[in-house]
Image (cartoon, rainbow, N blue to C red):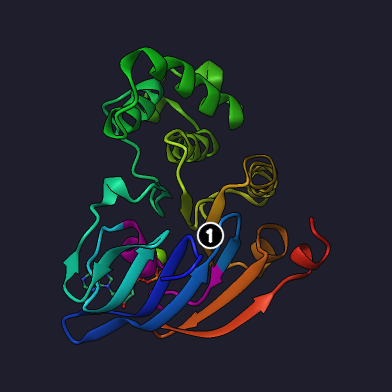
Amino acid sequence: MNSSLLSLTNVTKRFASHQAVDGVSLEVVAGDALVILGPSGCGKTTLLRLIAGLEIPDSGEIWFAGAQAAGAGRSMMPAHERGIGFVFQDLALWPHLTVQRNLNFVLESVKMPRADRAARALEALKLVRIEQLSSRYPHQLSGGEQQRVALARALVGQPRVLLLDEPFSSLDPELRDALRGELARLQRTLHVTTIYVTHDQGDAAILADRVIEMRAGRIVAVNDTKRKEQGA
Ligand SMILES: Nc1ncnc2c1ncn2[C@@H]1O[C@H](COP(=O)(O)OP(=O)(O)OP(=O)(O)O)[C@@H](O)[C@H]1O
Ligand SMILES: [Mg+2]
C-alpha cells in the first residue's frame, strides 16, 4: 500500500500464446498526466483494459487508492466501482441512444439521483462545447462531434482516472490539434488524472507530465516532460 491513486505491480496478461502485457509496474498519483507511446500491438489497449477492470490480470496486482482492485486471475473491484472514465479507441458510443441518454446511462450506473442527472449531463456537454447536440443520435454527428461525446461521456461520472485510447487518431490534423488543445485545457481546469494512449510523439508534448514507452508488453522507458518542469 502507498499514496498512489493507482498502482500496478508486475501485471501480466496473456492471450493464447501471446504475452500482451508482460510485467508492467506503474505508480500514478492524483493529477498525473501520463502518455503511453508505443507501436501497434505492444499492449497499450490491453493495459488500459486491465486498469479499467475489463480484463483480469494473469499475475500481478492493481490497486486504487489503497484498495486492491485485481490480483492473479481475479478482480476484487468491478469495473463500475473503479471510478474510471474511458474513451475507447473506437469510441463505442451507444448508437441507439441520443447524446443525452449516452451520458445518462453512465450517471445511472454511478447511481446519481435521477433529479440531478440532466444538470450533470449538461455540464459535461458544456465542457466539450456540444451542449446544443444533446438530442442527436451518434450517426447524426460528425467524427469530431462523436469524439467530443465520447469525452463528455467519460467525464460525466467525475472519474478518478480518465483513460483515453488514441481518442483523436481518426481525425484530420486540424481537428485533432483543436481537440488535443481542449483536452489539455480540461486537464488544467479539472485536474483529472489522465492516461492517454497514442502512437503520436506530438501528443506527448502537449498532454503529458510523464511519457511511458511500451514495446512488446513492457515499459521500456519513462520520461518526465518539460510540461511538468514548467509547471504548465
Ligand atoms: N482479446 C484478445 N484475444 C487475443 N489476442 C488479443 C486480444 N486483445 C489483444 N490481443 C493481442 O494482444 C496484443 C496487444 O494488443 P493491444 O490491443 O493491447 O495492442 P495496442 O498496443 O493497443 O495496439 P494498437 O496500437 O494497434 O491499438 C496484440 O498482439 C493483439 O493481437
Ligand atoms: Mg490499441
Whole-percent x and y of residue 138? 38, 30
Please provide the residue range marked out in magenta: 36-52
Q: Is residue 63 visible?
A: yes
Specify whether 195 is left or right of 217: right
Specify whether 219 is left or right of 12: right
Callout 1: few (<14), some (14-19), or many (20+) C-alpha neighbours within 10 Å?
many
Q: Is residue 185 above or below residue 169?
A: above
Specify whether 48 is left or right of 209: left
| Total labels drawn | 1
Q: Is residue 134 above or below residue 201?
A: above
Which residue in the rendered view is the most extreme toward the right? 230
Does 225 lie within the magenta span? Answer: no
Whole-percent x and y of residue 69? 29, 62
**206 and 231: which one is in front?**
231
Residue in view at x 24 percent, y 84 percent: 18
Query: Does the beta carbon at disc 1 come under 8 Å from ligand 2?
Result: no
Amino acid identity at mark 1: Tyr
Ligand 2: which quarter?
bottom left
Quarter of the picture holding the C terminus: bottom right
Residue designated by label 1: 196
Does 37 lie within the magenta span? Answer: yes
Q: Secondary structure at mark 1?
A: strand
Q: Image quadrant of residue 32? A: bottom right
**151 and 190: which one is in front?**
190
